[in-house]
Image (cartoon, rainbow, N blue to C red):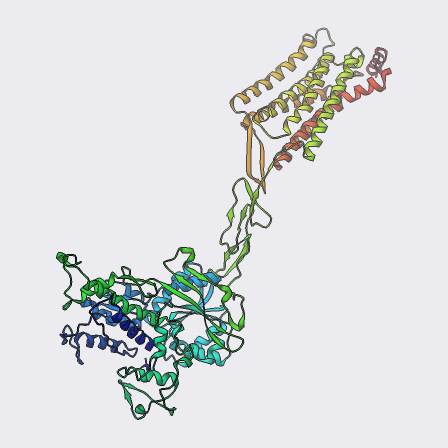
Amino acid sequence: MKQLHSQFYIERYQCVLAMAFATDEINKDPKVLPNVTLGFRIYDTCFSDLAATEGAMHHLSNRRESAPNYSCNSEQKMAAIIGDSPSSASVAIARILGVSRFPQISFGSGLSTLSDKRQFPSFLRTAVKDYQPEVIVQILLMFGWTWVGLFASDTEYGTQGSQKIREEADRYGICLEFSETLSAGASKKRIGHAVNRIRTSSAKVVVLYVYPAEISPVLEELSQQNITGKVWVAIAGWFSSLVFSRREFWKTLAGTVGIASYSGAIPGFKDFLYAIHPSKYPGDIYMKLFWEHAFGCQWKDTLNQSKVSGSELVRASKPPCTGKEQLESLDAALYDVHTFRFSYKAYMAVHALAQGLHDMLSCQIEKGPYNNRACADSQHFLPWQVLHYIKNVHFKNTAGQEMFFDANGDSPVAFDILNWQLNADGSSGFVKVGRYDAAAPQEEMLLINVSRILWGEGSTQVPISVCSKPCPAGYRKSSLLGQPSCCFDCIPCSEGQISNKTGSSDCIICPDDQWSNEKRDRCIPKVIEFLVYEDPIGTTLSALSLLFSLVTALTLAVFYIHRHTPVVKANNTALSYLLLSSLTLCFLCALIFIGKPTELTCMLRHVLFGIIFAVCLSCLLAKTTTVTIAFRATQPSSILRRWMGSRTAYSIVLVSSFIQVLLGLIWVSLAPSFPEVHSQAMYGTTIMECNEGSAAMFFAMMAVLGILASMTFVAAFLARKLPDSFNEAKYITFSMLIFITVWLSFVPAYLSTKGKYMVAVEIFAILSSSLGLLSCIFVPKCYIIILRPNMNTKEYLTTTTKSIQKY
């Protein structure tokens, strides 16, 4: 990276100060490493992988010109290397140190690959490994952002991180509208392309998985073009950079949310940072550089100096440093003495090393962890022996915060969630709005106080960043052809299905006993439907059934009272009584069809109906046959004379009825009707009805009725003009026409209806056909008996008969 060596980073220097503070704290603690004094050397790697490698080799060999696998220092023993901060530099160092299992504790490298102990067996870190992609995706999920853009660093760190973000995003249904890479020193064309992607993007949220130096040119261009309204989600490195100290970026970056290294407590460190002064640490070659950079001044003894510690410093005219400047006057964005994020990791790295050395030197003879339970030689210990103890440290620092390494040499994963806020008074700063703790229960890992967040332009309303608005309850997503999964249409759920939450991908099928409501957002119990007496239809049909049965009973009473009159006696009184009784039962059997179906009512419904109607039709057939035989057997030599008499009529009734009774008994015995529930027959309704059990037996009984009706109709039609003043044949003909018409109309109506209406149609057919028989056959006779008694005499009958015969 060009010219990075000429810059001075205060936050990095604070890590040096944290290491010095920790070393001094340990040396003063009689409980840790008693009689042992810790020291350290600082090597500036200048953000260069090559310089980091050279520094590691120099420390190992203790020579200006490094000699691999050789150390010139026989007196001072170096126990471990703490660093480096950039992941790329740590990788370079770790490959060398891993050969001899030399301990390395990094306080800033987060690359996930460094957790691989086969490649980097001696690498440990107090910095959190690159768990940031998972945390970033969890933040996106918490705010409901499913349509985002991504900028990633064009390095191994950025490549691995962006790939992990894509995987996690796909896992949770988050789509990337665009994904771009950036590198330091990008061309104007590349910067312009990035700015154009941001400006034309419909996504309101942009994830920044890049180093601040890589995107700074893009931010400059965005600021110049006054492009705002985007929410930036940044990684940990951002919040320790100087990007937020540039006022021209404030409006663009307002509302930025991101993750930052966990800010641990370092008791006494604040006072230490305020107490430092070049005069106190004359051997610290960086102290004066820090002072000059912090206060914008220049020391007199460095005025003509062109090189300091190998770094070229280009100085403009600055006021001289007096040494009386007050550190308390520095802005927190430049010299943060309250929130120790980066420096805390360096502080804990020193303590982890010290605790490992303490455990190693506290080893009791014959209780050691090595072969033969040996302990390490305190004067001539080997690197892998120190590594063993450091890997197994588990302690609490002076603030009571726990520290340990897992099997991969990683420290516990914990982040702070920060929000960069631009206040109405022109001030700005970071506000901690939440935290992420991987060790917490699943539901408590990510906690964010949304009410504390201040978005761009001072808004407290969470911005919306979606390709398509979430489907409301009652709808489901329908993917758009050629579009990401986050872009969709909303389709209403089908009947019997629901979606009870916003953003459902699929509709849920309701249980069999439930159905969807009109909004399709919840299942409601189905209405159990069967024809009941309380229903208007049921009330009407039951009333008609009772009324007609009463009228039929009254007609029977009238016939019985006038049983000796010619009209009653003219056409077989016994058959008339039987027919009227059967019609009464026909009207009453309709009541069996009303009410909740049970095993008994289902079994009796069609069987009783079929038998009773068979008796009715048999009576009519017997009546018609008797009249026909009577008029056809007038000749003494006619063979029909032997069939005359009531025996023939009764035989017809018995035989026809017996056939129907036999079919009914077979039906009831082998496959009787039974109650059945149909949950899918009608929308929102569970139909309870009687299953015929055997459709063949049902149609067989109906066929017998059809045959009897047809035979009766033919016989009556042929006998309709026989000379008799009380000839019933023409009335029976009309009644059979009504009967056949009703039942032929019944079949399609019955098949086209469901539920209670199907039962109502069947009851209506029973009542109307029975009423047709009653009206056509008995109403004319009742008219004569009640209203025209003069016609109900033997003289009138004889006279009328003669007139008919003469005619």
Given residues 717 and 583, the one toward you in this image is 583
Vertical position of residue 541 compared to residue 584: above or below? below
Vertical position of residue 438 compared to residue 803: above or below? below
Please provide percent x and percent y for residue 273.
35, 77
Please provide percent x and percent y for residue 559.
77, 15
**Residue furthest out toward the top:** 636
**Residue furthest out toward the right:** 790
Please provide percent x and percent y for residue 2.
32, 82
Vertical position of residue 249 compared to residue 412: above or below? below
Count of marks overlaid on the render:
0
Please provide percent x and percent y for residue 13.
32, 78
Given residues 217 and 602, the one toward you in this image is 217
Given residues 648 and 110, the one toward you in this image is 110
Say if residue 770 shows up in the picture: yes
Q: Quadrant of residue 290?
A: bottom left
Q: Quadrant of residue 438?
A: bottom left
**Residue furthest out toward the front:** 30
Horizontal placement of 801 versus 601: left or right? Answer: right
Q: Quadrant of the C terminus?
A: top right
Q: Quadrant of the N terminus?
A: bottom left
Given residues 712 and 393, the one toward you in this image is 393
Horizontal placement of 589 versus 285: left or right? Answer: right
